[in-house]
Image (cartoon, rainbow, N blue to C red):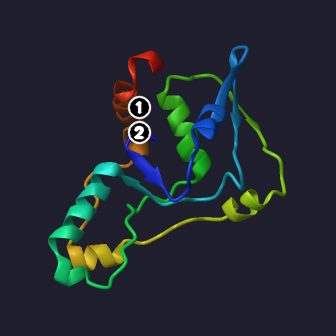
Amino acid sequence: MPGRRSAGTWSRTRRRALARWEGRHLVYTTGIGDPAKRWSWVHVDDLADAYVRILDNPAAVEGETFVIADDQRLTALDMQRTAIRAAGHTGEIALESTEAGCMLQLAADQDELVTSAKAHRLLDWTPRHISFTDAPTRHYRAWKAAQPFSAR
């Protein structure tokens, strides 16, 4: 997701395998775990703002650990479908499951939701950027513009 980081991690290979064209239909690999799982997200600029606030307030944060995320609570599948649509795909999206039973699937087969209540309280931090799903085309264009010319 452009400018966004999730509680989950995505390797370059996974991103490439996430969605692929087969003929004229998009086959979407649902990934590891339950596609209905929900993750916490944060815009990279909001994360940077939280870091600056932490560095600017050493007395307030001494001994503290912060978890930074916005309040968005979409499923992984909804977020990924939104990204596919923002990339311009208008046709049907077929779902294809990955191999069941691996340890990574067991670990990823759960919600990964966090709260930034402590950052709100101690740092007066709140996310300022709209969620990816509120402006997916804008986020996609920003991501596309940031890619090396050969990847466009």
In which image quadrant can residue 46 be found? bottom left
Residue 40, labelled with which disc?
none
Label 2 CA crowd tier, 10 Å (few <14, some 14–19, many 20+): some
Residue nearest the viewer, comparing 13 with 43: 13
Give, as a three-letter code, the residue at label 1: Tyr
> At numbered mark 1, what does the secondary structure look like: helix, strand or loop?
helix
Residue nearest the viewer, comparing 76 with 90: 76
Q: Which part of the image, by quadrant, shows the C terminus?
A: top left
- Residue, far left: 56
Counting from the top left corner in percent of width and height, residue 129 is at 29, 50
Residue located at (63% from left, 40% from top): 14
Q: CA distance from mark 1 to mark 2?
A: 6 Å
Counting from the top left corner in percent of width and height, residue 26 is at 67, 25
* Left or right of 82 on screen, residue 46: left
* Left or right of 152 on screen, residue 33: right
> At numbered mark 2, what does the secondary structure look like: helix, strand or loop?
loop
Counting from the top left corner in percent of width and height, residue 41 is at 44, 56
Counting from the top left corner in percent of width and height, residue 115 is at 42, 72
Residue located at (78% from left, 44% from top): 98
| Residue indicated by mark 2 | 2
Badges 1 and 2: C-beta atoms under 8 Å apart? yes
Residue located at (52% from left, 38% from top): 82
* Left or right of 95 on screen, residue 75: left
Give, as a three-letter code, the residue at label 2: Pro
User: In the image, is residue 30 above or below residue 9?
Assistant: above
Label 1 CA crowd tier, 10 Å (few <14, some 14–19, many 20+): many
| Residue indicated by mark 1 | 140
